[in-house]
Image (tube, rainbow, N blue to C red):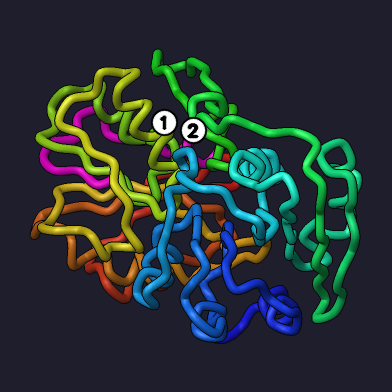
Amino acid sequence: MSLSLPSQLLLQQDLPKNALLINPPRDDLAHELDEPTWHVASFSYAVQQHYKNMDYACVDICAPLAQEYGHIVIYLPKAKARLKYVLDFAMSALTKDGEIWFVGENKGGIKSLGKNLKDDFNSIVKMAMGKHSAIVCAQGPQRRTTFNLNDYFISHENDHGLTLNSLPGVFSQEKLDKGTQVLLKFLPRKIKGRILDFGCGTGTIASYISQNREYEEIEMIDDDFLALKSAQANIEANKIEFTEAFASDGFSQIEGRYNWIVSNPPFHQGIKTDYNVTENFLRQAKEYLKLSGKLLIVANEFLNYEVILREHFKGVTTVAKENGF
């Protein structure tokens, strides 16, 4: 593990002793800060565990903050929809004379950030540049927010009669993506036994499977806390029984084996494409399947996952090809 470019730039600054750190990457920043006195709020379970293992206090990014902070450092989120979320979250606990540092790569939107903040702060200054990154300092907050997670849900009904609730930045937030559409179209009508929805997002796949009523148990896992809150909301909205959504870094929190593992696996980390998560998932999936268990995934045609699958499974079949998937 190494330092990301924004983290390298951040460490060149005169850092406050106490601060709230929001949305940090999974890099060596935790090791480089002088003491674990900063509080950390992350969208990612893996990142949260990384900081917890270094004795940092982690706060829930889905709940109101319990104290105020004079200094807050925000790593700019990839999803534009999450900028308002993290800004509201931070400003709900920022002191009147406090400041927020926004850290990000130039190609990740930090250059144009100022115009998005002009109505929220008295002063917005680009305080540091380098490492293909920048730090923007915002002072003099012009508003105070009361943070409530329920204010950020978007709800819609899909063609399968399901109510789907989703939070900012969760994949396929406002409508069903093409890949999942293809997967659901060719999903066997009756899936029985114990089922895992890997990288569940809003829980659409598991919600659809639940309509057949012949499963024993469905578990949904994701690394993203907003995805899990969305999935949990959809379990309640659609009255899905024997179903649970929980955080896991890959298979780290999984116990036992499944009859089916179903997934539209992710391949993005931050602003970059990263196939490691999915490739590791494909390599490890067999270990979590029962002897007669099956893995069913959908992926873009250009992603050559079949090679990896054939290294670990005796039988690999292409069920369908449609719309580039």
Residue 311 % position (x, y): 31, 76
Residue 303 % position (x, y): 54, 62
User: Could you tell me if the residues under marks 1 and 2 are in contact, i.e. CB atoms within 8 Å?
Assistant: yes
Q: Amino acid at mark 1?
A: Lys
In the image, taking residue 308 as reference, residue 218 lies left or right, namely: left
Q: Label 1, secondary structure: give it.
A: helix
> Residue at image x 69%, y 81%?
11
In the image, taking residue 128 as reference, residue 4 lies left or right, namely: left
In this rendering, is residue 210 above or below 205? above
Residue 208 % position (x, y): 33, 27
Q: Is residue 148 magenta?
A: no
Residue labelled with disc 1:
185
> Residue at image x 81%, y 39%?
120
Q: Identify the magenta region.
A: 178-196
Q: Label 2, secondary structure: give it.
A: helix
Given residues 173 and 120, the one toward you in this image is: 120
Given residues 155 and 125, the one toward you in this image is: 125
| Mark number, residue 181 | 2
Which quarter of the picture shows residue 47? Answer: bottom left
In this rendering, is residue 40 above or below 30? above
Q: Amino acid at mark 2?
A: Gln
| Mark 2 surroundings: few (<14), some (14-19) or many (≥20) residues within 10 A | some
Using the numbered discs, state the Cα–Cα distance from disc 1 to disc 2 in whole angstroms.
6 Å
